[in-house]
Amino acid sequence: MEDNLTRTQRRAIPLILAEKSIEAGCRAAGIARQTFSTWLPQLLRHVCRDVLDYALKMKEMTEVEARLDVLERTVARRAGRA
């Protein structure tokens, strides 16, 4: 997976997680609370896009599997007649 985090985000995330609150973590990381809030909507968009991509791939694979099952049954049935 491609790492799209900025250097500031890579540095700040462990500091934020180590604190008891987001506000304390932002202070420890030297970023504004608003900056962290901005990161969260960006992250949410990325996560939603990934979930939708995986859901579409799952749907596609389910359809392919169903078609393959039909083909396998047809081949097995025809092989039984030969």
Image (cartoon, helix red, strand yellow):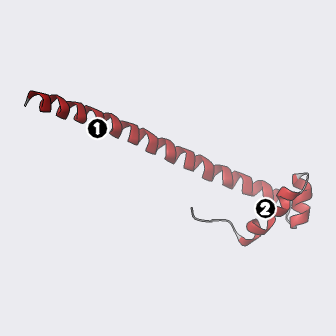
- Which residue is identified by label 2? 13
Q: Quadrant of the N terminus?
A: bottom right
In the foreground, 42 or 75: 75
Please name the residue shown 79% across and 57% down the image. 36
Mark nearer the viewer, 1 or 2: 1
Q: Position of residue 74 (x, y in %)?
A: 19, 31
- Image quadrant of residue 17? bottom right
Please name the residue shown 92% across and 57% down the image. 24
The crowding category of the residue bearing disc 1, from other C-alpha atoms within 10 Å (few below 14, some 14 to 19, many at least 20), is few
As helix, strand or loop, the secondary structure at mark 1 comes to helix
As helix, strand or loop, the secondary structure at mark 2 comes to helix
In the foreground, 45 or 61: 61
- Image quadrant of residue 18? bottom right
Residue 49 position (above or below residue 81): below
- Which residue is identified by label 1? 68
Sequence order check, earlier mark of 1 and 2: 2
